[in-house]
């Protein structure tokens, strides 16, 4: 009879541990899913939608390019949400035929801030002396390609730019 009680007691012990473990695992699954959810989520580095930067009437055909800051109204990643986040900057110009063009201010060589020289009528990188034409084409310097164009659209008299980061120091234009 002692053998029968030991077996019954062992079974009850094992069953209690198994049931407790199953309940604990069921409770842990939603907690772990909530905690690890952002790990599988793509981190957002820039908005997918165009950002409104200025009125089209502020751009005059043939005038010097205009530098504008590009700020996301809201930027969200797996864990947080931020308001009014600076993404970068762009050079905007309106060509003689009325087309609005946008170029990243980051030099495609090493990412220095590209400026505009009114005397030379061209974009110039002060770090390594790369020069770019008004249409963004490479003129001289160590850079391997021209300025990176940014997608731009004009809606209801407003210029909207989608900020894109490109890989640096490559001859081919690839998103970073």
Image (cartoon, rainbow, N blue to C red):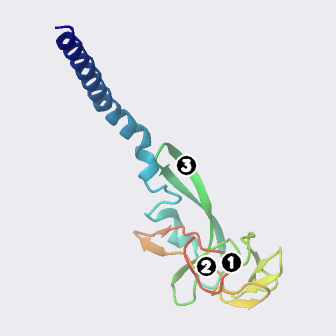
For disc 2, the neighbor class at 10 Å (few under 14, some 14 to 19, many from 20) is many
Is tag 3's residue or tag 2's residue first in the polypeptide sequence?
A: 3
Decide if residue 156 is on the left or right side of residue 13: right
Q: What residue is shown at x 75% (from left), y 70% (from top)?
A: 112
Q: Is residue 94 above or below residue 15?
A: below
Which residue was labeled with disc 1?
A: 108
Give yes or no for contact between labels 1 and 2 (Cβ–Cβ under 8 Å): yes
Q: Quadrant location of the C terminus?
A: bottom right
In whole angstroms, how far apart are the C-alphas of marks 1 and 2?
Answer: 7 Å
Which of marks 1 and 3 precedes in the sequence? 3
Element type at mark 2: loop
Q: Is residue 5 above or below residue 56?
A: above
Residue 107 figure quarter:
bottom right
What residue is pinned by disc 2?
A: 148
Q: Residue at x 56, y 78 (%)?
A: 174
Give the label, 3 or 1, closer to the camera: 1
Q: Nearer the viewer, residue 170 or 52?
A: 170
3 or 2: mark nearer the eye: 2
Residue 59 image point, x, y percent = 58, 75
Q: Which residue is mark 3?
A: 84
Element class at badge 1: loop
Helix, strand or loop under label 3: strand
- The percent coordinates of residue 92 (x first, y second) are 60, 74
Tell me how far mark 3 sits from mark 1, CA to CA.
Answer: 26 Å
* Residue 129 in the figure: left or right of residue 27: right
How many numbered discs sit on the rendered protein?
Answer: 3
Question: Where in the figure is residue 90, as x and y percent of width and height?
Answer: 62, 70
Q: Nearer the viewer, residue 42 or 28?
A: 28
């Amino acid at each position: 009879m002692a053998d029968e009680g030991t077996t019954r007691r062992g079974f009850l012990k094992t069953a209690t541990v198994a049931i407790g473990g199953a309940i604990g695992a069921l409770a842990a699954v939603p907690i772990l899913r909530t905690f690890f959810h952002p790990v599988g989520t793509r981190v957002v580095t820039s908005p997918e939608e165009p950002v409104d930067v200025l009125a089209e009437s502020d751009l005059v055909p043939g005038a010097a390019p205009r530098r504008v800051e590009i700020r996301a109204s809201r930027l969200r990643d797996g864990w947080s949400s931020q308001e009014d986040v600076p993404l970068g900057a762009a050079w905007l110009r309106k060509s003689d035929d009325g087309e609005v063009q946008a170029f990243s201010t980051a030099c495609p060589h090493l990412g220095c801030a590209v400026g505009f020289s009114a005397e030379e009528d061209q974009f110039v990188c002060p770090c390594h002396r790369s020069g770019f034409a008004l249409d963004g084409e490479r003129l001289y310097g160590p850079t391997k390609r021209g300025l990176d164009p940014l997608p731009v659209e004009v809606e209801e008299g407003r210029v909207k730019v989608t900020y894109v980061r490109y890989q640096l120091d490559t001859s081919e234009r690839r998103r970073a």
